[in-house]
């Protein structure tokens, strides 16, 4: 099963945001060096993904209780471009999605909310739709396609 094509570094830096949340680097997000502890970036990606799900009407807690499918991450990567320090304001963006038969890729950018050219980090995740009972890949469910609608990015 092939993953949807990866976003290039240039695409992650240049694509317009399809959805975003504004936040800041919290005290509990930094390490002893005073910069963001590296896994916190993936939490920011998960937060904006969850915000998009809610914005598009997918009640994730209800889906976890009653839903028949899940979309676990099978790949995650990030590039740290500038130091993220305690108190820094952030805009965490989903810049696009690429779809396969049973998987999808999301592209992310973390930027300064007042200066989008000030990019802190970029990244991408690959999710695979699975039947929750059998934990086997399934075609992308319509509910998931509805959430991703309007985020599709053409492949290079």
Image (spheres, rainbow, N blue to C red):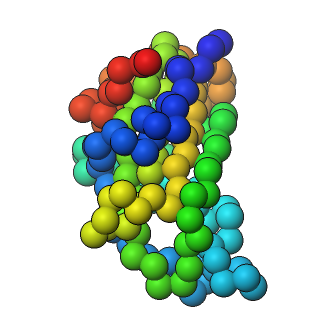
Q: Quadrant of residue 148?
A: top left
The x, y position of residue 44, in whole percent, is 50, 61
Q: Is residue 28 above or below residue 144?
A: below
Q: Is residue 21 above or below residue 18?
A: below
Q: Is residue 154 left or right of residue 8?
A: left
Say how many tags the image has: 0
Q: Quadrant of residue 82?
A: bottom right
Q: Residue furthest right?
A: 32
Give me the residue at 36% from left, 57% from top.
117
Residue 144 or 97: which is nearer the viewer?
A: 97
The x, y position of residue 28, in whole percent, is 61, 83
Give me the residue at 39% from left, 76% from top.
89
Give me the residue at 64% from left, 77% from top.
35
Residue 106 or 137: which is nearer the viewer?
A: 106
Q: Is residue 103 above or below residue 71?
A: above
| Quadrant of the drawing holding the N terminus | top right
Residue 140 or 4: which is nearer the viewer?
A: 4
Q: Is residue 56 above or below residue 27?
A: above
Q: Is residue 142 left or right of residue 3?
A: left
Q: Is residue 144 left or right of residue 137?
A: left
Residue 156 or 52: which is nearer the viewer?
A: 156
Q: Quadrant of residue 90?
A: bottom left
| Quadrant of the drawing holding the C terminus | top left
Kindly tell me whether residue 50 is visible in this rendering: no
The x, y position of residue 96, in whole percent, is 37, 36
The x, y position of residue 85, in whole percent, is 56, 79
Kindly tell me whether residue 136 is visible in this rendering: yes
């Amino acid at each position: 099963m092939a993953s949807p094509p990866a976003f290039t570094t240039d695409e992650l830096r240049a694509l317009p945001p399809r959805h975003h949340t504004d936040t800041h680097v919290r005290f509990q997000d930094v390490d002893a060096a005073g910069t963001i502890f590296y896994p916190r970036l993936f939490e920011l990606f998960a937060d904006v993904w969850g915000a998009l799900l809610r914005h598009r009407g997918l009640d994730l807690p209800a889906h976890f209780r009653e839903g028949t499918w899940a979309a676990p991450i099978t790949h995650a990567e990030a590039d740290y471009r500038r130091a993220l320090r305690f108190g820094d304001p952030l805009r965490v963006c989903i810049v696009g999605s690429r779809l396969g038969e049973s998987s999808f890729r999301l592209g992310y950018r973390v930027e300064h909310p007042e200066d989008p050219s000030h990019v802190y980090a970029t990244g991408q995740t690959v999710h695979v739709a699975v039947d929750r009972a059998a934990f086997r890949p399934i075609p992308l469910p319509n509910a998931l396609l509805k959430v991703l609608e309007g985020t599709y990015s053409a492949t290079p």
